[in-house]
Image: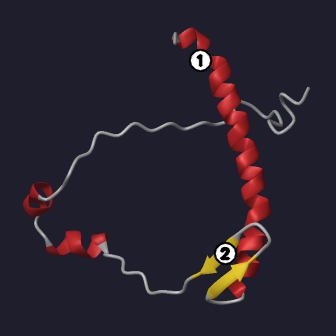
Amino acid sequence: MRKSNVGPLVDELGLLEARIADIEIMAQPLRDQIKAMGAGAYEGELFRAVVSEYDRKNLNMKAVKQKLSPQFIRAHTKYTPTTSLTVKGRNAIDVTTEGDD
């Protein structure tokens, strides 16, 4: 696909991501209510939700970097080729109403 033809794809993706963001806003209070019930499995007519409570370990990289030499960190750093995509609105239009014809 030519770069000159990518505009409609960018706009379609942006509109979809705006709709997803709106749905996430609606879903979060439901998640919070279910989590507030505590650990366990909860059955609906169509879906099953499982709430798990556990301790998650996190490595404090700031503290680790202070204790290890820069050479050690470089020797043990893995680089992975990555491609990222960021979609943002170009102006103040309400994207949730765009394309509703």
Residue at image x 31%, y 75%?
59
Q: Position of residue 58 (x, y in %)?
A: 36, 77
Looking at the rendered structure, the secondary structure element under dot 2 is strand
Q: What is the three-letter code of the residue carrying label 2?
A: Ala
In this view, the residue in front, 54 or 49, is 49
Q: Position of residue 42 (x, y in %)?
A: 70, 81
Q: Which mark is residue 73?
A: none
Q: What is the three-letter code of the residue carrying label 1?
A: Val
Residue at image x 79%, y 35%?
92
Residue that mark 1 sits on = 6
Would residue 84 appear left or right of 22 to someone viewing this image?
A: left
Residue at image x 66%, y 90%?
38
Residue that mark 2 sits on = 49
Asked where in the image residue 10 lies, by quadrant, the reply is top right
Q: Position of residue 90 (x, y in %)?
A: 69, 30
Q: How many marks?
A: 2
Residue 15's place in the image compared with 57, above or below, is above
Q: Position of residue 84 (x, y in %)?
A: 45, 38
Looking at the rendered structure, the secondary structure element under dot 1 is loop
- First along the sequence among labels 2 and 1: 1
Residue at image x 63%, y 87%?
40
Structural distance between the alpha carbons of marks 2 and 1? 39 Å
Residue 70's place in the image compared with 41, above or below, is above
Considering every residue shown, the one lying at the far right of the view is: 101
Residue 48's place in the image compared with 80, above or below, is below
Residue 16's place in the image compared with 26, above or below, is above
